[in-house]
C-alpha cells in the first residue's frame, strides 16, 4: 500500500518506503523512455516536513505520466511492437496521435497500391500493343517471303508429303528445302540449257551428256529422280520434257501425282502461267485426293493470279479453304493470298 499523504508529515519509516516506491517507479519509467522527465525531481530525498500539497501534486503528475506511457505502450503493442515491461495502472484516454499516424500510413499504402496497379495496367497495355505489332510484322514478312518464293518458283508443296494425305513411298527426301528455284550445285554446267525445241546436251552432271530431257531406262523411281534432279538444277525445259515423258510411261505410278505437280512447276517458274494453270488444274482433276491435292489448288490460284484473273483465283482459294484434308500451313498461305487479293 502507498503511504497516506493526508497527514502533514511523514515518519522516517514512511519516508524510506516512499523513497523506495518512487525509485521503483522511476526505474519503470526509465525503461519506457520517460526517466529523463521524472527522475530528477523524484530521486531527491523527501524531507519529513514537506508539504502534503506538494507531494500530492507530484503524485498527480506521476499518475498522469504513467497513464500516458501506458496508453502509448498499449497502442504500440496493438500495432505489432510488444512493450519491454509489464503495464500497470488504469487505462487512459490518450493515444489519439498514434492512431492518427496509423490511419495516415494506411492511406499512404492504399495510394501506393493504386499507383502500382495503374502502372501494371499501363505496362500490360503496352505489351499487348507490342504483341499486336509483332503479329502484323510477322504476317507481313511471311507474305513478302511468299512473294519471293513464288517469283523464284519454289512451291510450298515441294516435298512429296506436302499435301493433306500421306507421303508417297520412294519420293525424294525433303525437296521442299531444295526447291525448283535453288541455284545449281557447284561444278554443274548451267550455261548450255537446251532451248524448248529440244536440242540435246546441257543436262545435269548426274544425267548422261547426250540424254537432255530423255528419261533413262530403268525403274519408275529412277526416272522420277532423274526428272526431279533436272528441276533442282534449274533446267526447266529439260525437266518439263522429262516429267511429260514420265507421265506417258508411268500413268499409274504412285509418283504420277508428284510428277504432274512438278510439270506445272516447270511452267510456273518460267512465268508461263497459262500452261502452269492447265497443268495444275489437270493434276487436281486427276489426283484430287493425293498428297498434292491441296498444293494443286494453291498453285492453280497463283497461276490464275499471274494471268490477271483474280476472281477465278479467289474461287480456287475458297475451295482450298474448304478442303478438310489440306495441311494447316497450306490453309494459312491460302488465307494470306486471299487477303492479298482482297477476296470477299
Image (tube, helix red, strand yellow):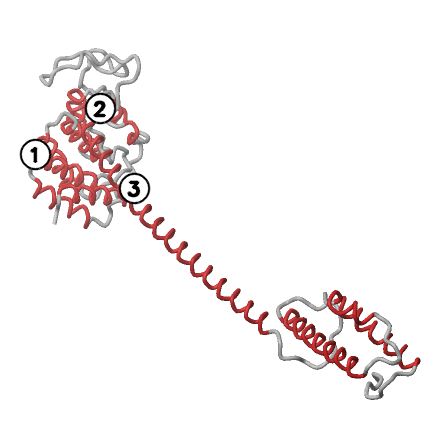
Instruction: Find the distance from the CA under tag 2 to the CA under tag 1.
Output: 23 Å
Instruction: Find the distance from the CA under tag 3 to the CA under tag 2.
Output: 23 Å
Q: Quadrant of residue 111?
A: bottom left
Q: Earlier in the sequence, mark 2 or mark 1?
A: 2
User: Circle 2 sits in a helix, a strand or a loop, which is it?
Assistant: helix
Dot 2, how many residues are within 10 Å of its Cα: few (below 14), some (14-19), or many (20+)? many
User: Circle 3 sits in a helix, a strand or a loop, which is it?
Assistant: loop
Dot 1, how many residues are within 10 Å of its Cα: few (below 14), some (14-19), or many (20+)? some
User: Circle 1 sits in a helix, a strand or a loop, which is it?
Assistant: loop
Q: Residue at x 24, y 42 (%)?
A: 330
Compared to residue 191, the image places residue 257 above or below, namely: below
Q: Quadrant of residue 232?
A: top left
Q: Tell me whether the residue at label 2 lies in contact with that at label 1, contact meaning CB atoms closer than 8 angstroms.
A: no
Q: Would residue 169 appear left or right of 250 to someone viewing this image?
A: right
Instruction: Find the distance from the CA under tag 1 to the CA under tag 3.
Output: 32 Å
Q: Nearer the viewer, mark 1 or mark 3?
A: 1
Q: Residue 166 has which mark?
A: 3
- The location of residue 67, given as percent across then percent down, is 69, 77
- The location of residue 325, given as percent across then percent down, is 24, 47
Q: Write down the residue under mark 2.
A: 231
The quarter of the rendered structure image containing the N terminus is bottom right
Q: Would residue 21 appear left or right of 122 to someone viewing this image?
A: right
- The location of residue 123, given as percent across then percent down, is 38, 51
Q: Nearer the viewer, mark 3 or mark 2?
A: 2
Q: Residue at x 22, y 34 (%)?
A: 144
Q: Write down the residue under mark 1.
A: 307
- The location of residue 183, given as percent across then percent down, is 26, 20
Q: Nearer the viewer, mark 2 or mark 1?
A: 1
Compared to residue 60, the image places residue 338 above or below, namely: above
Q: Residue at x 76, y 77 (%)?
A: 58
Q: Quadrant of residue 332?
A: top left
Judging depth in this view, the residue of 2 and 179 nearest the camera is: 2
Amino acid at each position: 500500500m502507498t503511504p497516506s499523504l493526508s497527514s502533514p508529515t511523514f515518519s522516517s519509516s514512511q519516508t524510506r518506503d516512499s523513497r523506495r516506491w518512487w525509485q521503483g517507479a522511476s526505474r519503470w519509467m526509465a525503461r519506457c523512455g520517460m526517466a529523463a522527465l521524472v527522475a530528477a525531481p523524484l530521486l531527491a530525498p523527501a524531507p519529513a516536513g514537506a508539504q502534503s500539497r506538494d507531494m500530492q501534486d507530484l503524485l498527480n503528475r506521476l499518475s498522469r505520466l504513467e497513464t500516458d506511457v501506458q496508453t502509448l505502450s498499449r497502442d504500440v503493442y496493438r500495432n505489432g511492437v510488444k512493450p519491454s515491461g509489464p503495464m500497470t495502472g488504469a487505462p487512459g484516454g490518450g493515444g489519439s496521435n498514434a492512431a492518427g499516424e496509423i490511419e495516415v500510413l494506411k492511406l499512404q499504402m492504399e495510394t501506393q497500391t493504386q499507383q502500382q496497379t495503374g502502372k501494371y495496367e499501363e505496362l500490360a497495355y503496352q505489351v499487348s500493343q507490342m504483341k499486336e505489332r509483332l503479329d502484323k510484322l510477322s504476317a507481313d514478312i511471311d507474305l513478302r517471303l511468299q512473294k519471293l518464293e513464288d517469283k523464284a518458283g519454289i512451291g510450298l508443296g515441294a516435298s512429296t508429303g506436302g499435301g493433306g494425305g500421306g507421303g508417297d513411298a520412294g519420293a525424294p527426301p525433303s525437296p521442299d528445302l531444295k526447291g525448283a528455284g535453288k541455284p545449281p550445285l557447284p561444278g554443274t554446267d548451267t550455261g548450255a540449257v537446251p532451248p524448248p525445241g529440244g536440242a540435246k546436251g546441257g543436262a545435269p552432271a548426274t544425267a548422261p551428256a547426250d540424254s537432255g530431257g530423255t528419261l533413262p531406262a530403268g525403274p519408275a523411281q529412277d526416272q522420277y529422280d532423274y526428272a526431279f534432279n533436272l528441276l533442282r538444277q534449274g533446267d526447266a525445259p529439260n525437266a518439263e520434257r522429262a516429267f511429260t515423258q514420265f507421265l506417258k510411261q508411268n500413268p499409274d505410278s504412285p509418283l504420277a501425282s508428284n510428277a504432274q505437280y512438278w510439270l506445272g512447276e516447270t511452267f510456273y517458274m518460267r512465268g508461263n502461267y497459262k500452261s502452269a494453270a492447265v497443268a495444275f488444274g489437270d493434276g487436281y482433276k486427276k489426283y484430287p485426293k493425293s498428297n498434292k491435292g491441296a498444293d494443286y489448288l494453291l498453285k492453280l490460284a497463283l497461276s490464275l493470279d499471274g494471268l490477271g484473273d483474280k476472281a477465278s483465283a479467289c474461287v480456287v482459294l475458297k475451295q482450298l479453304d474448304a478442303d478438310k484434308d489440306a495441311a494447316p500451313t497450306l490453309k494459312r498461305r491460302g488465307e494470306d493470298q486471299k487477303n492479298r487479293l482482297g477476296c470477299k
